[in-house]
Each structure stands twice: as structure tokens, then as C-alpha cells.
Image (tube, rainbow, N blue to C red):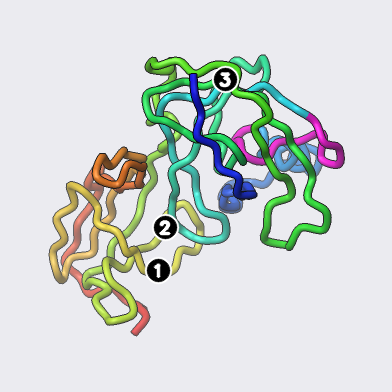
Amino acid sequence: CSLVGSEMCIRDRCSIRPLPPFKEKPPAPMKKLLTLLLLPLLFGGCELGDEDESHTEIWTVASEKGVAGIAMDFGHTPAYIVKKGSAAAWEIFSGSVVGFTFEKGYESTIRVRIDPIADPPADGPGRRYTMELLISRTQMQSAVDPLQFSPEFDVTIASRRADSPATIGYWFKDMRYPDPRWEPFPWEIEGFGFKPGFEARIRIRPVAEYDDTKGDYEVKYYQTELISSEEKASEDIPE
């Protein structure tokens, strides 16, 4: 096995967008606290424990990539699918590992050193990940479906496109939030047929796909369901 490593110091980024508030009766204070503590474990990329000490872990990196959300904004980025230590479950890791080069179609086992970053910026990563050892690299299809890390969600598409010089694409509302606002959506949605003058609610899924011409992954959005389409002029769209 061989590895083309990078000597650049690339830091990871925690890419989990805050969840929308509860729409139903909020949980009791103790249950709410427990929920907040468990969120990083459920969504990956921001592990608990060992925050203040350097340590190493054995990771398995899957042969395909999934997607992770971008923090404090709408959008998605390709991300590693990993198992950490003896954990049985695959999870998304949205950061970078110094010295590790991902190769599509190969499952890798690596030893990763995790170092805390002193006084990180408020919107920056708190840890640096470095590959200490490439233990194995095997050409195979990992036993994980990348689509399980590509959750579907509903959006509303405005009746006119965002076609100003500063904004292209669609105006959309992210319906996962209780008070959604119109935001620019600068990507095409595969399978969606835009009709001027019609406001549509659709279900979409972000998918990480490999582009042979670029030699890397990119995220594409697909319509999985047309929920409704109503002839109307969307209100309060930014000018």
C-alpha cells in the first residue's frame, strides 16, 4: 500500500447546523439537558470526551463519501464516513485529517492523533486531526450505504427565480424551521420542473457524487417528491 500525504495543516470543521426548536410541548429541563448533551454523538463530527487532552484513535474510513451540513448556513459538503475505535456504527466526519489522502473505492484503517487547539475562534474548529499511521488500505465496497447520511427534507420554492446579478437559482424556504424565511438557493435541483408563477413545496435530498472529470466529490440536490404546486405570487421575496 502507498499513500500520498499532504503536509498542509488542515483543520476540521464542525458542520452540524442547529436543529429547529421543538414544535410540540418542550421536554422537562432534565430531558432537554440530556438531549443537548447527546446531539453531537447522534450526528457525528463533534465528539464528546477527551476535549482537553491529545489522544489517538483507530478509524476505518469508508470507500465512499456522504454529506454533512454547513454550520450556520444552508448547504452541504462531501464528508468522510467513518467508524471510530470499536464502534459498530458508521458516522459522518466533516473535517480533514492531515496526512490522509482519500481514494474512492478503497476502505482505509488509520491511526489518528487528535490534538486540542488552544483558544480556537468562536466559529472555528476545536481540534486538529493528523494521521499517524496507515494501517491498511483495501480495494472494496464498504458495508455502508452513503444515502443513509443524506436525509430528505422539505423546502418551498418561490414563484419566481432569484435571477439578479448577485443571486442566481431559486428563492426557497427551509421547512425544517418553524419560521422559515426566503433564502437564495444557488444550485439546480435534479428532477424539479420550475414553473414561473407557481409556488411549489418539494422534498429534496443532497447526495455526494463522484465527478470523474474533477477527480473529487460534489453535492447534488434531487427532488424525491412534489408535495404541492399552487399558482400564486410568493410574498415577501427579497428584492
Q: Nearer the viewer, residue 163 or 78?
A: 78
Question: Residue 17 at x, y = what percent?
Answer: 56, 52
**Label 2: element kind:** strand
Question: Residue 166 at x, y = what percent?
Answer: 33, 80
Vertical order, 202 against 87 (above or below): below
Q: Residue at horizontal 47%, vertical 20%?
A: 107
* Amino acid type shown at disc 3: Thr
Distance in Å between CA atoms under marks 3 and 1: 40 Å
Compare marks 3 and 1 and give the one earlier in the sequence.
Answer: 3
* Amino acid type shown at disc 1: Glu
Instruction: Mark 3 vs mark 1: give the one in front.
Output: 3
**Left or right of 57 on screen, residue 147:** left
Q: Residue at horizontal 76%, vertical 41%?
A: 28
What numbered label is drawn on residue 109? 3
Dot 3, crowdedness within 10 Å: few (<14), some or many (≥20)?
many
Look at the image and say whether residue 216 sits in the magenta stretch: no
Compare marks 3 and 2 and give the one earlier in the sequence.
Answer: 3
Please, what is the dominant secondary structure of the magenta stretch?
loop
Distance in Å between CA atoms under marks 3 and 2: 37 Å
Point out the stretch of residues depicted in magenta: 42-55
Question: Residue 238 at x, y = what percent?
Answer: 37, 80
Instruction: Mark 3 vs mark 2: give the one in front.
Output: 3
**Label 1: element kind:** strand
Q: Nearer the viewer, residue 46 or 182?
A: 46
Q: Residue at horizontal 73%, vertical 33%?
A: 113
Query: Where does label 2 land, which residue?
Result: 174
Query: Where does label 1 land, which residue?
Result: 183
Dot 1, crowdedness within 10 Å: few (<14), some or many (≥20)?
some
